[in-house]
Image (spheres, rainbow, N blue to C red):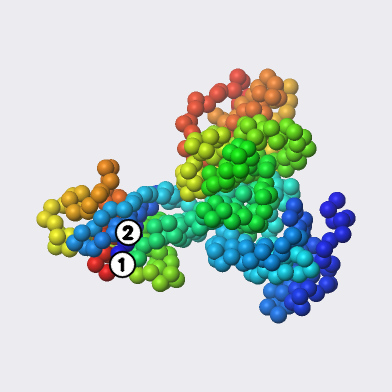
Amino acid sequence: MADLVPTLLRPGETILNKYRVERFLGRGRFGEVHLVENVPMARYSALKVVVVKDPATQRAVVEAQAHSLCGHDHVVEIRSADVFDGSVLIEMEFVEGGSLGDRLQREFVPVLDAIAYVKSVLYALEHAHARGIVHRDVKPGNIMLAPRGAKLSDFGTVIHPGSGIRVTDEFYRPHASPEAANDGEFSPASDVFAAGLTLLRAANNMSDEWERLLADPIAWRRAVADGVLPARIGYADWVPGGLRRVINKACARDPADRYPGAVAFRQALERLRPERRWLRLSADEWACDRDGRAETVRYVPGRRPGVEFRSGSRRVTDRCGQFDTEREARRWLGRVLAETTLAGSAPRRQVRRPRTPASDVFA
Amino acid sequence: MKALGFNIKKGELWFCVLEGDRAAPAFLAQDRHRFDAEQPRTGLAHFFKQTFGEVIDHTKPDLLAYRVSLDANGADQVAYLCYPFGILNLIAHERGTPIREFVTQSFSKRALGFAGDKLDACDARISNPPPKWGRDGKLAALAAWMALDG
C-alpha cells in the first residue's frame, strides 16, 4: 500500500532547477526514490530523498562515499548530493532492471543467477572493505540488476570502523550477524554473513516466505541474536549441496568460522562450476538449456507418482524414477535438480534405481 | 620499489609481490585466485578485470609484471592464457602504472644472476620466501623480480 502514502515529490515537479520528477520508484526505511530527469545534463537518474536531522552532514558523508566507492563496476554510481528542504537528495545511476528483491517477487530466479549476483556484490564489498568501509545493509533490495551484472546500492548505513565515522546507528537487523546484532561489532565478516543470508534467500527464492518470517518480530529477533536464522530458514530441495556448504560457512555463527572476507567467499563461489540453469516453469516442471539442448525434469502424478528427466528427446533413465508417495517423488525431483545444477560440486552418489523399470512407467 | 607479478595457468591466477631491487629482491606476499576456464569469454574477461583491480588495490604496487605463456594450443587456451593480459595492460594504462611483459625465456641465468635452475633461483636469491612455494607462484615471482630494475 506504499503508493497510497503521499510522496515527498510529485511527478512533473522540478526540484533545484535541475531535476524533473518522472515517477515514484519506491520507498525504503530511509526515504523514497524517484525517477527524475536531470535536465541540464540530459540524463535520467534515480533520486533518493532522505529526511534527516542534519542534512548538511549527511550530504558531506554521501559525497565522500561517492568519491571513495564510485567508479567500481558493481557499485551503483552516486552522481551528486544536494540539501533541499530539510532532506538530502542523492542523485544515483538509474538501474532499469530493478533490484534482486523486485525480481524475487516477480519471478523465479535460477540458482545460477543468484550465485552470479552475489559474486558481483562480493566484488563491490571487497572494494568497500579495502577502503575500510562496512556496508551493513546487504540484502536483495539493495542489489540492483544492471544489464552487465549486479550492483550494490544504498551506502546510507555504512560505517568506517577505523575512524569510527557513521551517519546512522541503523542497520538491516534481519541480516545482522550475531556479533553485530548483540554487541554492535561490525566488520567485513558481518557483511560476509549478510551476503551469505542474501544468497540463501535468493537461492531459495524466498519472497512471501521472508515477509511471513518477519511478521513475527520476537521470533526472528531471537533467531538473529542467536545466529540461527539461516538454519531456521533451511534450504529448498533444489539448492545444490556444494552451494549449501558455502552458504553455511558464510553464515557461521562464530566469525572465526566464516570466510575471512568477501574475496574468500567469492573464491569459494568461483569454485562451484555452473552446469544447468534450471528454471521453474511450474511446481511440477523445470527446464534448462544445456549446450543448446533443451532439458526438462518433471513430476508425473499418478497412482505411483514419478519423476521424468529428458535431455532433448532422450529420457535419462538413471534420473527418472517411480515412487510410492508424492512426497518421495518430489524429494527425488529436488535431489535431481540439486545434483545437476553444478558440475562436480559433490561426489557423485550411487543413483537410486526406481522400483519399477522406468520404461514400464512412462511407456 | 614494489612489483606485482602475475602468472596464469588453467583455472588459476597466481600473483606474487616483491620489493627491493633486482639484486636484492624480498618476498612480500603471494596467492592465487581460481577461475572457471570454461566459462564464456565475457565472463572470463569480467573475472580478470575485477580480480586484477582487486589485487592491485590490495597490494598497491609501484609496477606490474606478468609472464605470458606461449603454450596455448587453441582459441580456448588463448582466451584464458593470453587475453587476460590485454585487460591487465588496460588497467595499467588507466592507473598510470608501469607494466612489463616476460616469457619463460626471459628468466635466463644471466638475467637472474644465478647459475642454476630459475625456480631454484627464487629460493636462493629472494629473501624471506614462503615455506611452501610451487612452480606457478615462482613464475609470478620471477616476473615481479625481473621488473624490479624498472
Q: Quadrant of the C terminus of chain B?
A: bottom left
Subunit that carries the residue with mark 1: B
The alpha-carbon separation of the residues under discs 1 and 2 comes to 9 Å
Q: Which residue is nearer to you in this view: A348 or A94?
A: A94
The residue that appears at 69% across and 38% down in the rendered structure is A285
Subunit that carries the residue with mark 2: B
x then y, percent, for residue A146: 63, 60
Q: In the displayed structure, does residue A274 sit left or right of residue A333? A: left
x then y, percent, for residue B77: 37, 55
Q: Is residue A303 visible?
A: yes
Q: In the displayed structure, does residue A344 sit left or right of residue A238? A: left
The image quadrant that residue B79 belongs to is: bottom left
The image quadrant that residue A336 belongs to is: top right
The residue identified by callout 2 is B5
The image quadrant that residue A43 belongs to is: bottom right
Q: Which residue is nearer to you in this view: A163 or A68?
A: A163
In the rendered image of this protein, does residue A184 appear above or below residue B49? above
The residue that appears at 59% across and 23% down in the rendered structure is A354
Disc 1 on helix, strand or loop?
Answer: strand
Q: Amino acid at mark 2?
A: Gly
Q: Is residue A279 visible?
A: no
Q: Amino acid at mark 1?
A: Arg
Q: Which mark is residue B100?
A: 1
**Callouts 1 and 2 in the same chain:** yes
Q: Which residue is nearer to you in this view: A159 or B126?
A: A159
In the rendered image of this protein, does residue A284 appear above or below residue B37? above
Q: Which mark is residue A187?
A: none
Looking at the image, which residue sits at the far left? Answer: B115
Question: Total marks drawn?
Answer: 2
The residue that appears at 17% across and 50% down in the rendered structure is B124
x then y, percent, for residue A87: 75, 65
Q: In the displayed structure, does residue B104 sit left or right of residue B60? A: left
